[in-house]
Image (tube, rainbow, N blue to C red):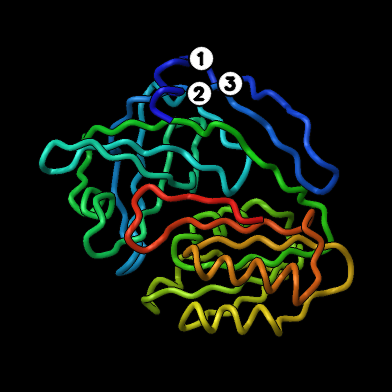
Amino acid sequence: MDDIINQFTYSMSHPVPTEHPPGPTRRVRHELLRRDVRVRHVRPLGPGLLAVTFGGPALASFVSLSFDDHVKFIFTDADGQEHRRDYTPRHFDTVRQELTLVFALHEGGAASAWAQRARAGDAAVIGGPRGSIVIADDLPWYLLAGDATALPAIARRLDELPAGTPTTVLLHTPHEQDQQALPQRPGLKLRWLPSGEALCDAMRTVDLPAGDGFVWCAGEAACMARLRDILLNERGRPRSHVKVSAYWKPGASDFHQDLA
């Protein structure tokens, strides 16, 4: 991605629609820009989650059309080494030109360590998003599932769906206190689960209402592969109405893979 960001320094203010297969999604490509930003403030969301808000004039043309967009977060660790990680834009304030990312904290993670020591004025770089896959918001129902790394995307989706839309959320987090991170809303059925195994079991038995709703899942790679198989093979969901992404993999850095 570095080559792409360095090569293209265009504005992202005019997203470019692109062709997409039939179904409830549409793909929009964005012209890429590398944006220098600084930390505005840091807010704990629980023992395992930290929200960091960035600001700066470079964000004037920032756009994010989908709740699961990814930006490239580029930062320097305490030893001066540069790192790059993918993060979901949790919130963007167009008036203040402020972008909020939520960090899932874990032992030994370079991005986690950066976020925990971040202070107002610290510098970083935001690249992208390179594109958005926009999921229709007028379907009869939605099912959202994942682990702590999916919380920012799921929370944003709950913020943006029309009020009263039937939505089921299946989530597991390592800390019970992190469960406060999701907004409450009419039509929401929320289940917190103790493990990835329990998440897979819940996906096998969760009630799926009539009609072509949409299922979205994100989290650890092996667990997401199992959820994909459960949805497509065991539960017979149409591929056009399922999106499954692996946000992380044990032992791998800067990992992201679309599985369905």
Callout 1: 10 Å neighbours few (<14), some, many (20+)?
Answer: some
Amino acid type of the residue tagged 3 in the rendering: Ser
Q: Residue 155 location, x and y as percent?
A: 55, 59
Task: Tell which of 244 and 161 is nearer to you.
Answer: 244
Task: Tell which of 68 and 49 is nearer to you.
Answer: 68
Mark pair 1, 2: CA separation: 6 Å
N-terminal of the two: label 1 or label 2?
1
Q: Is residue 230 above or below residue 197?
A: above
Residue sitting at x 57%, y 56%: 245
Provide the secondary structure element on which disc 2 rests. loop
Indicate the quadrant containing the C terminus: top left, top right, bottom left or bottom right.
bottom right
Callout 2: 10 Å neighbours few (<14), some, many (20+)?
Answer: many
Residue sitting at x 56%, y 43%: 69
Residue sitting at x 41%, y 47%: 101
**Residue at the spot of label 2:** 32
Q: Tell me the tag on residue 13.
A: 3
